[in-house]
Image: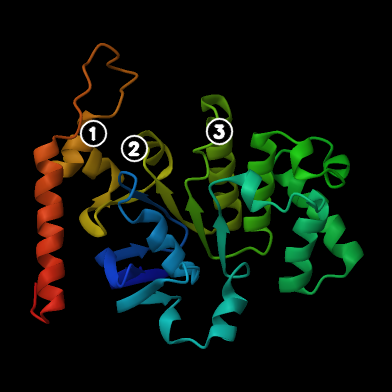
Amino acid sequence: MTAILAVRDLHVAIGRRGHAANVLRGASVDVEPGEVRGLVGESGAGKSMLGRAILGLLPANAVITAGTIAFEGRDLLAMPEPERRKLLGRRIALIPQDPMTSLNPVRRVGAQIAAVLSHHLGLSKRQARARAGELLAEVAIREPGRVLDLYPHEISGGMRQRVLIAMAFACNPSLIIADEPTTALDVTVQRQVLQLVERLRQSHGAAILFVTHDLGVVAKICRTMTVLHAGRVLEDGMTADVLARPRHPYTRALLAATPRADRPAEALRPVPPALIESLWSEAHRLDRLADAGLPS
């Protein structure tokens, strides 16, 4: 099957105090149509930066120095900016991490969803509001007509996340970048949101790149997974295979550090500092080779 998203050998650097710090070092990821791929790793691994690069939302001081990002067979990096922007929200959507900072606090919920529909689908104000109500009902928000007229601070965190999910699926995109969408939620609400995302994925047929540091979430909803550290892909494959037979020491260390409900008495083992040090040493070695123009 042809991948709907194909990231190849992507390098991203961030300028800082007169020099560049590499945050992605030759990362490659495929997402097939309709699948959920987990992108996992500890904080600072480069997960969110990879998602931002796909969306074209890198910080102002970040630059892509090498690689390609192909979406539906077209290289996003070679696409004119106005054309690429038309894809965002329409064909490629984002479920961000923090709903409180992602929603406009001075605009009503319904107006924010309607703005997406009007901009991308050309719906009239009345049509957009009606469709916004339908979307809220689709994400299991009670009394959607009432919620449309509320401000973000007047609804719970779980409801705000559902609003963002409704906005992401509003235009039936073929790819969604979900950037740790359950991090700010309690365990019960997290489970509800994961079930909701999976139900919507099946009904809409969208592919999802699910960015997370939680291997438990990956095990529940991701068919495939990619393990990232220091901007490098260390392991990639079917989720069941990677979790049952991890090949890389870092993946094995992450699994050993993950609490298991089926083995509550088992002691957790932190990722060994020596392993982290060796991974960073290898990353810096690759940086030096790249700076010298030598192959890795």
Residue sitting at x 8%, y 77% = 295
Q: Mark 3–mark 2 contact, CB under 8 Å?
A: no
Q: Mark 1–mark 3 contact, CB under 8 Å?
A: no
Residue sitting at x 37%, y 33% = 216
Relative vertical location of residue 221 with respect to residue 236 in this rendering, above or below? above
Q: Is residue 27 visible?
A: no
Question: Which label was assigned to residue 255?
Answer: 1
Q: Is residue 108 left or right of residue 237?
A: right
Give the mark nearer the N terminus: 3 vs 2: 3
Locate the C terminus by quadrant.
bottom left
Q: Secondary structure at mark 1?
A: helix
Q: Residue furthest right?
A: 126
Residue type for callout 3: Leu
Residue 69 rendering spot, x and y as whole percentages: 38, 75
Could you give the CA–CA distance between mark 3 and mark 2, rounded to whole angstroms?
16 Å
Q: Mark 2–mark 1 contact, CB under 8 Å?
A: yes
Give the mark nearer the N terminus: 1 vs 3: 3
Q: Is residue 214 left or right of residue 81?
A: left
The residue pinned by badge 2 equals 215
Q: Is residue 271 visible?
A: yes
Relative vertical location of residue 262 with respect to residue 73 in this rendering, above or below? above
Q: Secondary structure at mark 2?
A: helix
Residue 123 rendering spot, x and y as whole percentages: 82, 70
Q: Secondary structure at mark 3?
A: loop
Q: Label 3 neighbourhood size at 10 Å, few (<14), some (14-19), many (20+)?
A: some
Q: Label 1 neighbourhood size at 10 Å, few (<14), some (14-19), many (20+)?
A: many
Q: Residue furthest top?
A: 265
Q: Label 2 neighbourhood size at 10 Å, few (<14), some (14-19), many (20+)?
A: many
